[in-house]
Image: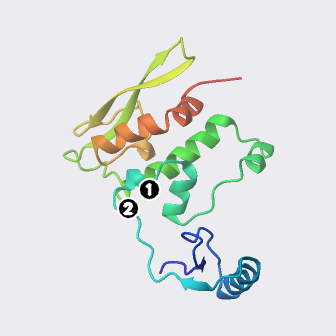
Amino acid sequence: MEKQFFMVYAEGQGAPTYKHENEQAASKEAERLAEKLGVNTTVLQAVKMVAPKDITKRVKTYADACAVLGIEPMNETVLAKLGFTKDEIAYRKLKTIAEALNEGWRPDWANSNEYKYWPWFVYNPASAGFSYATTYYAASYTSAHVGSRLCYKTRELATYAGRQFEGLYNDFLLIKK
């Protein structure tokens, strides 16, 4: 079930832009705006929120991946104080992103006919990091080049992840001071 929310519309003021978690907060805001602006206001209740079907339109950041999965983002400050390194935090983020982008698909390593894709990077000393180069797959063999939690169900998703999250892959793959 989707989380219900409310918005306030003030006549002649354009589309509502702020989501309220409950009707009371929205009503209070509607009263405040009606007095301040001298116009009628309406509290709108969301009946249904429609998200783009294409997962790459919904997952552009780590926070987006968390939202898709319905989980809270990690508190990186706390993790760093607990001794987690930048690469460990990046790996956890990439696992979350892969899970969201794969929309429930998990690799079946016992199935040699199932292709599993991952982004492939080339080290570029000019940029002091890896750059996305291409996508590789495995169907009849396994490889130690990539963790199984960071593979994707399609070439397109692996390409997207490699390009969109190149910085996180650099944090994960490189030893930086």
Q: Which residue position holds label 1? A: 58
In the rendered view, tell whether residue 134 sits above or below residue 70: above
Closer to the camera in the image, 46 or 91: 46
Instruction: List the single residue furthest toward the left.
Output: 113
Circles 1 and 2, Cβ within 8 Å, touching? The answer is yes
Residue drawn at x 44%, y 49% as measured from the top left? 98
Kind of element beneath mark 1:
helix
Q: CA distance from mark 1 to mark 2?
A: 7 Å
Instruction: List the single residue furthest toward the right.
Output: 81
The reply, left or right, for residue 134 in relation to residue 20 is left
Which class describes the residues within 10 Å of circle 2: few (<14), some (14-19), or many (20+)?
few
Instruction: List the single residue furthest toward the top.
Output: 126
Residue drawn at x 56%, y 47% as measured from the top left? 93
Q: Which residue position holds label 2? A: 52
Closer to the camera in the image, 93 or 131: 131
Q: Which callout, 1 or 2, points at the residue further toward the start of the chain?
A: 2
The reply, left or right, for residue 153 in relation to residue 176 is left
Residue drawn at x 71%, y 53% as measured from the top left? 75
Residue 13's quadrant in the figure?
bottom right
In the rendering, at what x and y percent does residue 44 appear? Answer: 55, 83
* Amino acid at the residue labelled 2: Pro
Residue 21's quadrant in the figure?
bottom right
Residue drawn at x 47%, y 81% as measured from the top left? 1
In the rendering, at what x and y percent does residue 50 appear? Answer: 41, 70
The reply, left or right, for residue 121 in relation to residue 16 is left
